[in-house]
Image (cartoon, rainbow, N blue to C red):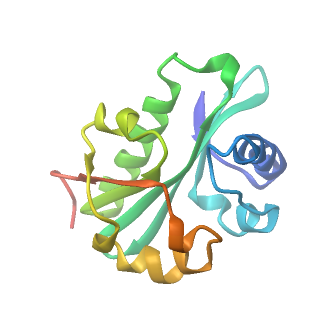
Amino acid sequence: MIRKAKVKDAKQIFQILQEFALKGILLPRSLNSIYENIRDFYVYEEDGKIKAVVSLHVYWEDLAEIKSLAVKEDVQRKGIGKKLVEKCIEDAKDLGIKRVFALTYVPQFFEKLGFKIVDKSEFPQKVWTECIHCVKFNQCDEVPVSYILEDSNA
Protein backbone atom coordinates (compact mmCIF):
# COMPACT_ATOMS: atom_id res chain seq x y z
CA MET A 1 0.00 0.00 0.00
CA ILE A 2 1.33 3.44 -0.96
CA ARG A 3 0.24 6.32 1.27
CA LYS A 4 1.28 9.72 2.52
CA ALA A 5 3.77 9.50 5.36
CA LYS A 6 2.75 10.29 8.91
CA VAL A 7 4.87 11.73 11.68
CA LYS A 8 5.00 8.30 13.34
CA ASP A 9 6.76 6.98 10.18
CA ALA A 10 9.77 9.30 10.45
CA LYS A 11 12.04 6.90 12.34
CA GLN A 12 11.37 4.03 9.92
CA ILE A 13 11.94 6.39 6.97
CA PHE A 14 15.22 7.50 8.55
CA GLN A 15 16.35 3.88 9.04
CA ILE A 16 15.67 2.99 5.40
CA LEU A 17 17.41 6.10 4.08
CA GLN A 18 20.34 5.56 6.45
CA GLU A 19 20.72 1.98 5.20
CA PHE A 20 21.03 3.24 1.61
CA ALA A 21 23.27 6.16 2.61
CA LEU A 22 25.73 3.81 4.32
CA LYS A 23 25.96 1.85 1.06
CA GLY A 24 26.69 5.08 -0.84
CA ILE A 25 23.48 4.77 -2.85
CA LEU A 26 21.75 7.84 -1.37
CA LEU A 27 22.96 10.98 0.32
CA PRO A 28 22.20 10.92 4.04
CA ARG A 29 19.27 12.81 5.58
CA SER A 30 18.98 13.70 9.22
CA LEU A 31 16.01 12.58 11.29
CA ASN A 32 15.29 16.27 11.87
CA SER A 33 15.14 16.88 8.11
CA ILE A 34 12.68 14.01 7.72
CA TYR A 35 10.41 15.40 10.44
CA GLU A 36 10.59 18.91 8.90
CA ASN A 37 9.68 17.54 5.48
CA ILE A 38 7.34 14.68 6.46
CA ARG A 39 4.57 16.10 4.25
CA ASP A 40 6.80 15.55 1.22
CA PHE A 41 7.05 11.78 1.80
CA TYR A 42 5.14 8.80 0.51
CA VAL A 43 5.71 5.33 1.91
CA TYR A 44 5.05 1.82 0.71
CA GLU A 45 3.86 -0.29 3.61
CA GLU A 46 3.63 -4.08 3.75
CA ASP A 47 2.51 -6.03 6.82
CA GLY A 48 2.72 -2.90 8.99
CA LYS A 49 6.34 -2.18 8.01
CA ILE A 50 7.59 0.55 5.71
CA LYS A 51 9.49 -1.09 2.87
CA ALA A 52 10.01 1.86 0.50
CA VAL A 53 10.00 5.65 0.57
CA VAL A 54 10.12 8.66 -1.72
CA SER A 55 9.56 12.38 -1.38
CA LEU A 56 8.45 15.19 -3.65
CA HIS A 57 9.94 18.55 -2.71
CA VAL A 58 8.61 21.72 -4.35
CA TYR A 59 11.30 24.29 -5.21
CA TRP A 60 9.43 26.88 -7.19
CA GLU A 61 6.10 27.48 -8.89
CA ASP A 62 7.04 25.17 -11.78
CA LEU A 63 9.72 22.88 -10.34
CA ALA A 64 9.83 19.97 -7.88
CA GLU A 65 12.37 17.28 -7.04
CA ILE A 66 11.84 13.59 -6.46
CA LYS A 67 14.13 12.79 -3.53
CA SER A 68 15.06 9.96 -1.23
CA LEU A 69 13.73 7.10 -3.34
CA ALA A 70 14.64 3.89 -1.54
CA VAL A 71 13.14 0.41 -1.84
CA LYS A 72 14.29 -2.26 0.61
CA GLU A 73 16.04 -5.18 -1.03
CA ASP A 74 13.41 -7.77 -0.14
CA VAL A 75 10.75 -5.94 -2.19
CA GLN A 76 12.89 -4.68 -5.08
CA ARG A 77 12.06 -5.60 -8.69
CA LYS A 78 8.32 -5.60 -8.00
CA GLY A 79 7.50 -2.21 -9.53
CA ILE A 80 7.27 -0.41 -6.18
CA GLY A 81 9.91 2.21 -7.05
CA LYS A 82 8.10 2.91 -10.33
CA LYS A 83 4.76 3.28 -8.51
CA LEU A 84 6.31 5.67 -5.97
CA VAL A 85 7.77 7.86 -8.73
CA GLU A 86 4.43 7.80 -10.57
CA LYS A 87 2.73 8.89 -7.32
CA CYS A 88 5.11 11.86 -7.11
CA ILE A 89 4.43 12.78 -10.74
CA GLU A 90 0.68 12.59 -10.09
CA ASP A 91 1.11 14.80 -7.00
CA ALA A 92 3.20 17.29 -9.00
CA LYS A 93 0.50 17.47 -11.68
CA ASP A 94 -2.16 18.09 -9.02
CA LEU A 95 -0.01 20.92 -7.65
CA GLY A 96 0.39 22.47 -11.11
CA ILE A 97 4.12 21.75 -11.33
CA LYS A 98 5.46 21.73 -14.89
CA ARG A 99 8.73 19.87 -14.35
CA VAL A 100 10.15 17.36 -11.90
CA PHE A 101 13.75 16.31 -11.58
CA ALA A 102 15.91 13.94 -9.57
CA LEU A 103 19.59 13.57 -8.84
CA THR A 104 20.40 9.89 -8.98
CA TYR A 105 23.06 7.21 -9.13
CA VAL A 106 20.65 5.08 -11.20
CA PRO A 107 19.65 7.22 -14.20
CA GLN A 108 18.59 4.14 -16.20
CA PHE A 109 15.71 3.56 -13.78
CA PHE A 110 14.38 7.08 -14.34
CA GLU A 111 14.98 6.95 -18.11
CA LYS A 112 12.66 3.90 -18.29
CA LEU A 113 9.97 6.17 -16.77
CA GLY A 114 10.41 8.90 -19.39
CA PHE A 115 13.01 11.10 -17.67
CA LYS A 116 15.85 12.60 -19.69
CA ILE A 117 19.43 13.17 -18.52
CA VAL A 118 20.10 16.91 -18.30
CA ASP A 119 22.69 19.31 -16.90
CA LYS A 120 22.65 20.37 -13.24
CA SER A 121 22.85 24.00 -14.30
CA GLU A 122 19.15 23.73 -15.20
CA PHE A 123 18.33 23.61 -11.47
CA PRO A 124 19.91 26.66 -9.80
CA GLN A 125 17.27 26.55 -7.05
CA LYS A 126 18.54 23.12 -5.97
CA VAL A 127 22.21 23.91 -6.40
CA TRP A 128 22.14 27.10 -4.36
CA THR A 129 19.78 25.96 -1.60
CA GLU A 130 20.93 22.39 -0.93
CA CYS A 131 23.81 21.23 -3.10
CA ILE A 132 26.07 24.05 -1.91
CA HIS A 133 25.98 22.53 1.60
CA CYS A 134 26.75 18.99 0.46
CA VAL A 135 30.18 17.46 1.11
CA LYS A 136 30.20 16.29 -2.52
CA PHE A 137 29.43 19.77 -3.93
CA ASN A 138 32.66 20.12 -5.93
CA GLN A 139 32.80 16.46 -6.95
CA CYS A 140 29.16 15.50 -7.30
CA ASP A 141 28.67 12.18 -9.05
CA GLU A 142 24.87 12.15 -9.10
CA VAL A 143 23.21 12.31 -12.52
CA PRO A 144 20.42 14.88 -13.00
CA VAL A 145 17.30 13.66 -14.77
CA SER A 146 14.22 15.67 -15.71
CA TYR A 147 10.60 14.98 -16.63
CA ILE A 148 8.23 17.50 -18.24
CA LEU A 149 4.63 17.19 -17.10
CA GLU A 150 2.30 17.66 -20.05
CA ASP A 151 -1.07 17.87 -18.30
CA SER A 152 -0.13 20.41 -15.64
CA ASN A 153 -2.94 22.37 -13.98
CA ALA A 154 -0.79 25.52 -14.04
Residue 110, x across and y down, in percent: 36, 39
Q: Nearer the viewer, residue 105 or 48?
A: 105
Left or right side of 34 for 58:
left
Q: Quick one: which residue is furthest to the left in this view?
A: 150
Q: Quick one: which residue is furthest to the bottom in this view?
A: 128
Q: Number of marks in the image?
A: 0
Left or right side of 48 for 66:
left
Q: Quick one: which residue is furthest to the front in this view?
A: 139
Residue at left offset 78%, top offset 28%: 49
Location of the N terminus by quadrant is top right
Q: Nearer the viewer, residue 100 or 44?
A: 100
Residue at left offset 39%, top offset 33%: 109
Location of residue 29 by image quarter = bottom right
In the image, is residue 49 above or below residue 150? above
In the image, is residue 136 above or below residue 109? below
Location of residue 154 by image quarter = bottom left
Residue 131, x across and y down, in percent: 53, 73
Residue 103, x across and y down, in percent: 45, 55
Residue at left offset 71%, top offset 69%: 36
Q: Nearer the viewer, residue 152 or 119?
A: 119
Residue 30, x across and y down, in percent: 77, 63
Left or right side of 7 for 39:
left
